[in-house]
Image (cartoon, rainbow, N blue to C red):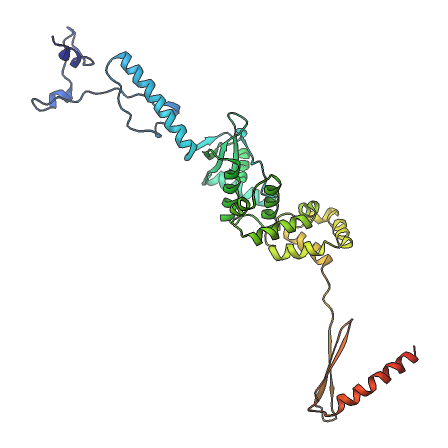
Amino acid sequence: MSRKALFANLGKPADDQGTPVESPAEKAAPSGVEAPVPRPRIRPILGSPELLKGQAAAPVGALGQSLSEFKAKSDRAAAIEQRLAEGQVVVELDPAVVEPSFISDRMATTTEAHSKLVEAIKEHGQQVPILVRPHPSAHGRYQVAYGHRRLRAAAELGRTVRAVVKALTDEELVVAQGQENNERQDLSFIEKSRFARRLEERGFRRDTIMSALSVYKSDLSNMLSVVVKIPEDVIEAVGPAPTIGRRGWIDLAELLSEVEKLEAVRATISAVEFSASDSDQRFRRIYGLIKPRAESTRFENWTTAEGAKFAKIVQNSEKVSVTINRRLVPGFSEFLLERIQTLYEEFESRR
């Protein structure tokens, strides 16, 4: 028997006498056409057959099959690692091996908001994966770029968290962290300002911080100015104040430059009942406490015997102004001006 014929019969089923038996595919093949030989399927690694499909079959023979199987596993593992590194695969991670970002961008959320998120994930599952990177110093652990609240919710539910794993530098992580929250319009002005300040304290350049927050240079300057002028204990007591924008926080920062006003605010935030209201209300309470009071202004008119208004008087706690209609009462303004000095001297003599 030729070598070709010998190898051609390997892997074919045989009868009791050892004679090779034609397979159904060979019987059905047209005359002169070689039928395809069925090939054993190799089980994919990592329990993830969907990651790589249509693997080539192993060559004939036990040794060749083992070598082919080993190479296939190696190729599959390399491909999976590459796709994980590129952030192309959503994986299920144990929340216990996932740590928060090295820079916090959020202030404490309300219990109600967190409960709503937990209930939504419990009912509908985690629709949007979080973004993590392999931990830079702890093998087998991960670090969150964004998705901290989803991670916390999954942990409370005792579920794995769906995540995209991507190799990120520190700079890439904070840019992704800031931009994702900015796209969701999820962070309040003061949270963004604190995030910017912490990035600056960690040595990140201004252009990186602007990219992370998608803001202009002037916006970043305002943010940093606010968190420098307002003490940290006041910001923490007020909270994120989601409806309070740039103007409100800038005004508060200016007001708190006066020592007596800062002392009044600290006395207010130390009260037990202060924390009972929501964050926006807490901001409005301390702002209302120290903002300048609107002056009470009074208006009055002088009239002629016929009832025509010839003068308007406007007065408040600091000044009085008199406006005279010269056309209506010609010469009266001069008459009044000539006597003002005399009237003042008479007033002083009676004091």
On the rendered image, what quadrant is the N terminus found in?
top left
Quarter of the image where one finds residue 58: top left
Instruction: Name above or below for residue 20 compared with residue 193.
Output: above
Instruction: Name above or below for residue 227 compared with residue 298.
Output: above
Where residue 329 sits in the image (x, y, percent)?
72, 92
Where residue 113 sits in the image (x, y, percent)?
57, 45
Q: Which residue is drawn at 35% across and 21% down?
A: 73
Quarter of the image where one finds residue 218: bottom right
Left or right: 133, with 105 as reference point: left
Quarter of the image where one finds residue 243: bottom right
Q: Nearer the viewer, residue 332 or 69?
A: 332
Q: Which of 61 and 325 is in front in this view?
A: 325
Q: Which residue is drawn at 59% across and 45% down?
A: 196
In the orientation shown, which residue stands out farthest toward the left? Answer: 31
Instruction: Name above or below for residue 24 compared with residue 260.
Output: above
Left or right: 81, with 210 as reference point: left
Q: Which residue is drawn at 14% across and 9% down?
A: 19
Can residue 150 be seen here? The reply is: no
Left or right: 224, with 331 as reference point: left
